[in-house]
Amino acid sequence: MIAFVAAIMMCCQPLADDPPRPKVQMQSALFSHSAPPGGKTQIAVRLIIPKGWHIYWIDPGEAGTPTTLDITTPPGVTAGVPIWSRPKRITDPAGTLIGYEGQALALVPLQVSADVEPGSILDIAVKADWLICRKACYLGGAEQVERLRIGRDSGASRTVATWMVGMSMPRPLAKRPDTQIHINDAAMTIEGPLGSAGQQVEFIARHVPGMEYGKQSLSVNGGRFKLVVPYHHRRGDSMGRPPAVQGLLTEGRTTADPCWTINQTIAVPSPHKEGDHK
């Protein structure tokens, strides 16, 4: 923990010759401007990042602070968990970071209750917070409000469709054709056909308390890949949470290439005594 805090301080120390404070531009839009009672829609949040700077994914890596979204909905509307576009690994003196350069996109599912009165206009408030870094780091944030009309579905927004061009939004690994995942008490193994993005396949982990990952290995044979990710579960550091492998399987080298979500709980036998599970 001390090393982590020290890395943050080193990363975030302002320098005398640092350029003016950078500004991240936040935009938001509803996937459809109206939805019927009992219907669904999404709200999209786009963050435009100044050239040469970066912000962080929901797991920032070895330093940094996660970018967060807070969606405030009125009675009758429920917001789901944000789905963030594919991040990238960023090499930095503070360590290997996971984040975004250029832009980031999040989609948040919205569920409308069946008893909401047609014709209602409901305000959906969006608040984003981030840490933007280069040689120095600055905290930032912004708020916006989108108005959702309850009624006949208005169809997909061209704005959101335009934002999604060139962005890779994660899909569940179960939807990747002919792909299997196996998890034992020492490693996760993923096997499947290579996609159009080529032979670059890797796992980007999302931190779960108590989970530590080793060096992953990739083998390719006959148009198929096998990715092995060793892990170790430290029961004493799990903060009472069940062990799980969470993160992204990524293909190719760019943030426009496909990525897939992984969220697998690990069955761990009850120990006979206190100690780490190995």
Image (cartoon, grey):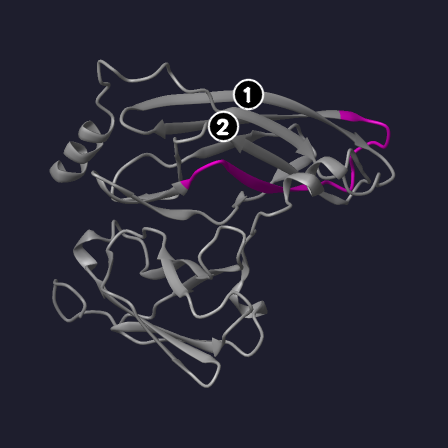
The residue that mark 2 highlights is 128
Magenta-colored stretch includes residue 104: yes
Quadrant that contains the N terminus = top left
Asked whether, in this view, residue 231 is left or right of residue 178, the answer is left
Is residue 42 shown to the viewer in this render? no
- Could you say where residue 159 lies in the image, as x and y percent from the top left? 72, 35
- Could you say where residue 243 lies in the image, as x and y percent from the top left? 31, 61
Considering depth in this image, is 186 or 50 the residue closer to the camera? 50
What residue appears at the point 39 percent right and 34 percent down from the top-left corner? 54
Distance in Å between CA atoms under marks 1 and 2 = 6 Å
What residue appears at the point 22 percent right and 18 percent down from the top-left corner? 15
What residue appears at the point 44 percent right and 38 percent down from the top-left corner? 101
The quarter of the picture where residue 149 lies is: top right
Circle 1: element type: strand
Query: Which segment is the magenta one?
Result: 100-121
Asked whether, in this view, residue 159 is left or right of residue 17, the answer is right
Would you say the residues marked 1 and 2 are in contact, meaning their CB atoms lie under 8 Å apart?
Answer: yes
Query: Residue at the bottom extreme?
Result: 222
- Could you say where residue 145 lies in the image, as x and y percent from the top left? 64, 22
Position of residue 194 relative to residue 253, above or below, is below
The residue that mark 1 highlights is 143
Q: Which kind of residue does numbered mark 1 sit on?
A: Glu
